[in-house]
Image: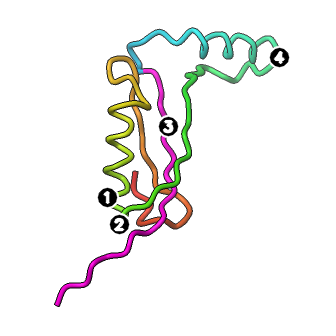
């Protein structure tokens, strides 16, 4: 006898960053501003973006797969950006 899984709520955090080979003028501007403010120990800044998502899925694996598809189709530009997905707030096993 098989039981169908009821969907659970998951919280995901997506971090999108420019690829290393891509120039990052925003990160460079922030780095220079930090140096002018006296933070001489900062060696590099890469500026990216972050998305916090709440979604329902049958399990952690399905939630992570759905968010990764969202990244490939909308949230990240695969030509110039990399992304990382993390399930947060006790949702699933916390893998990224």
Around disc 2, counting alpha carbons within 10 Å, would you say few (fewer than 14), some (14 to 19), or many (20 or more)? some
Measured along the vertical axis of the image, is residue 64 above or below residue 21?
below
Indicate which disc, 3 or 2, sits on the residue closer to the N terminus.
3
* Contact (Cβ within 8 Å) of mark 4 with mark 3: no
The CA distance from mark 2 to mark 1 is 5 Å
Majority secondary structure of magenta residues: strand
Going 39% across and 46% down the picture, which residue do you hit? 67
Span colored in magenta: 1-18
Q: In this orientation, which residue lies closer to the viewer: 24 or 66?
A: 66
Give how far apart the Cα atoms at labels 4 and 3 are: 27 Å
User: Label for residue 62?
Assistant: 1
| Front-lying residue, 11 or 19 | 11
Asked whether disc 4 touches disc 1, contact meaning CB atoms under 8 Å apart, the reply is no
Residue drawn 56% across the image and 45% down it: 52
Q: Which mark is residue 15?
A: 3
The residue positioned 25% from the left and 84% from the top of the image is: 3
Tell me the SS state at disc 4.
loop
CB of mark 3 within 8 Å of CB of mark 2?
Answer: no
The label shown at residue 29 is none
Task: Please tell me which of labels 4 and 1 falls first in the chain.
Answer: 4
Q: Which residue is mark 4?
A: 37
Q: Return the mark for residue 59.
A: 2
CA–CA distance between discs 3 and 1? 19 Å
- Crowd around label 1: few <14 · some 14–19 · many ≥20 (10 Å): few
Q: Name above or below for residue 56 compared with residue 30.
A: below
Q: Is residue 81 above or below residue 55?
A: above
Local SS, label 3: strand
Say few, some or many: other residues with alpha carbon within 10 Å of mark 3 (under 14 / 14 to 19 / 20 or more). some
């Amino acid at each position: 006898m098989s039981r169908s899984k009821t969907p659970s709520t998951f919280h995901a955090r997506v971090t999108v960053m420019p690829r290393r080979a891509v120039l990052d003028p925003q990160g460079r501007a922030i780095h220079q501003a930090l140096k002018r403010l006296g933070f001489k120990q900062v060696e590099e800044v890469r500026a990216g973006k972050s998305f916090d998502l709440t979604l329902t899925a049958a399990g952690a694996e399905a939630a992570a797969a759905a968010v990764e598809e969202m990244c490939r189709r909308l949230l990240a530009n695969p030509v110039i950006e990399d992304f990382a997905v993390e399930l947060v707030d006790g949702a699933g096993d916390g893998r990224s």
